[in-house]
Image (cartoon, rainbow, N blue to C red):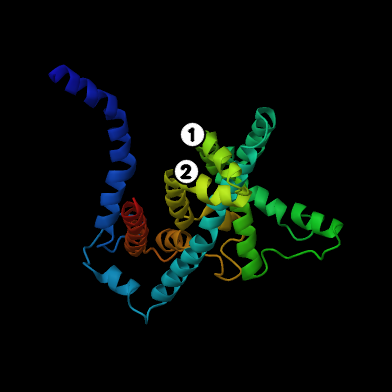
C-alpha cells in the first residue's frame, strides 16, 4: 500500500510543482503585495500599509475608483454579450455539421478549428488587417457589396463589435469540437422518435440537443465567462484600449496601473484581487445554479 501511495504522489508531482510555481506562489505573493506600497520596480523600502490600497479602490473621490470600476463594468458588459455568442454559435454549427457526411463534417471541423491554433498576438495582428479602414479585408468586402467603409476602431460601438467578431472567429473552433464530440453520445433514436411525433428541426434542437449537452454547455459557459473576464490581447492590439478608454478592460487597466509610470504595483495587486473575487463569485453562482437544477 505504501508503494502505491508513493507511486501516486510521483505521478501528480509534476502538476503540483507547476501549480505551486505558476499559480499558488504568485497568488499568495499578489495578496501580500496588495497590502504594501510596492512600486513594481524594487523591493527596497517596501512598507506595509494595511488596507490603504483597498480604500483607494473603493473611494469614489479618487480617479482610480472611476477608472477601475469603469473598466470592470465594460468588461462585465462584454461578458454578458460575448458568452451567449461564443457558446451559442458553435452549438448551432455543431448541430448542423453533425447532420453532414463524415467527409464534409471533417472539412468544416478543420476550417473552424484552424484559428484556435493561433496565439492571441497573431490573432490581434490579423484583426488589425481585417478591420483597417482603408485596406482592411472586412471593408474591402463591404465596398464590393456597395456599402460604405467603416472606421472600426474610431468609435466605441464599432470597436467592441470588431473585438467581438475577432474573438468569435478565434474561439469558435474549440467549443465546436467539444459539442461535436458530445453529440455523438446522444442516441439517434431520440431524434427518430421525435420525427415520428412530428417534431421539426428547432424542436429537436431545443428538447433533445440542448438537454443532451447540458453538462458540456455548462463547462463551455464557465470557461467562456472566465476567458471573457480576462479579455486583454484582442483590444490591446486592435484598439489599444481606445478610442479614449472605451475598450479598456479591467485586466488592461490593472496592468497599466501596475507597470505604468505611476509605480503603483501594490494598488494593481489589490485591484487584481478584487477582480479575481468577482470572477470567483460569478463562477460560484453558476455552479450553485447547476447543482440546484440537477
How far apart are the two marked residues, 1 and 2, measured between alpha carbons?
A: 8 Å
Q: Residue at position x 57%, y 58% from top?
A: 235
Q: How busy is the neighbourhood of tag 1: few (under 14 within 10 Å), some, or many (20 plus)?
A: few
Question: Relative to 77, is 13 above or below?
Answer: above
Q: Residue at x 45, y 55 (%)?
A: 225
What's the mark number on residue 292?
none
Label 2 belongs to which residue?
A: 212
Q: In the depicted view, which residue is nearer to us: 240 or 226? A: 226
Please state if 191 lies on the left or on the right of 110 as rendered.
left
Q: Earlier in the sequence, mark 1 or mark 2?
A: 1
Confirm whether residue 60 shows in the render: yes
Residue 280 position within the rendered picture, expressed as x and y whole percent measured from the top left: 33, 56
- Location of the N terminus (image quadrant): top left
On residue 185, which mark appears?
Answer: 1
Judged from the image, the secondary structure of the residue bearing numbered disc 2 is helix
Q: Residue drawn 86% across and 62% down?
A: 146
Identity of the residue furthest to the front in this view = 197
User: Regarding mark 1 in the picture, which secondary structure is present there?
Assistant: loop
Residue 151 locus on image (x, y percent): 73, 65
Q: Is residue 156 above or below residue 222?
A: below
Amino acid at each position: 500500500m505504501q508503494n502505491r501511495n508513493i507511486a501516486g504522489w510521483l505521478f501528480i508531482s509534476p502538476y503540483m510543482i507547476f501549480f505551486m510555481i505558476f499559480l499558488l506562489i504568485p497568488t499568495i505573493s499578489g495578496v501580500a503585495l496588495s497590502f504594501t506600497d510596492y512600486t513594481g520596480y524594487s523591493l527596497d523600502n517596501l512598507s506595509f500599509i494595511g488596507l490603504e490600497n483597498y480604500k483607494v479602490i473603493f473611494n469614489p473621490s479618487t480617479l482610480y475608483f472611476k477608472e477601475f470600476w469603469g473598466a470592470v463594468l465594460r468588461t462585465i458588459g462584454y461578458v454578458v454579450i460575448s458568452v451567449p455568442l461564443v457558446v451559442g454559435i458553435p452549438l448551432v454549427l455543431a448541430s448542423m455539421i453533425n447532420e453532414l457526411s463524415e467527409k464534409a463534417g471533417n472539412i468544416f471541423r478543420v476550417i473552424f478549428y484552424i484559428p484556435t491554433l493561433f496565439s492571441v498576438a497573431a490573432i490581434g495582428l490579423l484583426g488589425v488587417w481585417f478591420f483597417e479602414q482603408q485596406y482592411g479585408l472586412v471593408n474591402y468586402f463591404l465596398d464590393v457589396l456597395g456599402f460604405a467603409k467603416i472606421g472600426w476602431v474610431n468609435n466605441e460601438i464599432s470597436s467592441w463589435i470588431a473585438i467581438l467578431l475577432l474573438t468569435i472567429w478565434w474561439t469558435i473552433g474549440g467549443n465546436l469540437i467539444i459539442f461535436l464530440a458530445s453529440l455523438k453520445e446522444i442516441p439517434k433514436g431520440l431524434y427518430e422518435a421525435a420525427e415520428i411525433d412530428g417534431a421539426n428541426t428547432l424542436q429537436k434542437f431545443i428538447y433533445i440537443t440542448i438537454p443532451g449537452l447540458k453538462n458540456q454547455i455548462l463547462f463551455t459557459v464557465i470557461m467562456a465567462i472566465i476567458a471573457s473576464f480576462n479579455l486583454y490581447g484582442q483590444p490591446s492590439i486592435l484598439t489599444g484600449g481606445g478610442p479614449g478608454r472605451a475598450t479598456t478592460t479591467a485586466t488592461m487597466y490593472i496592468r497599466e496601473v501596475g507597470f505604468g509610470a505611476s509605480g503603483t504595483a501594490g494598488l494593481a495587486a489589490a485591484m487584481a484581487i478584487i477582480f479575481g473575487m468577482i470572477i470567483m463569485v460569478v463562477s460560484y453562482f453558476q455552479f450553485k445554479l447547476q447543482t440546484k437544477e440537477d
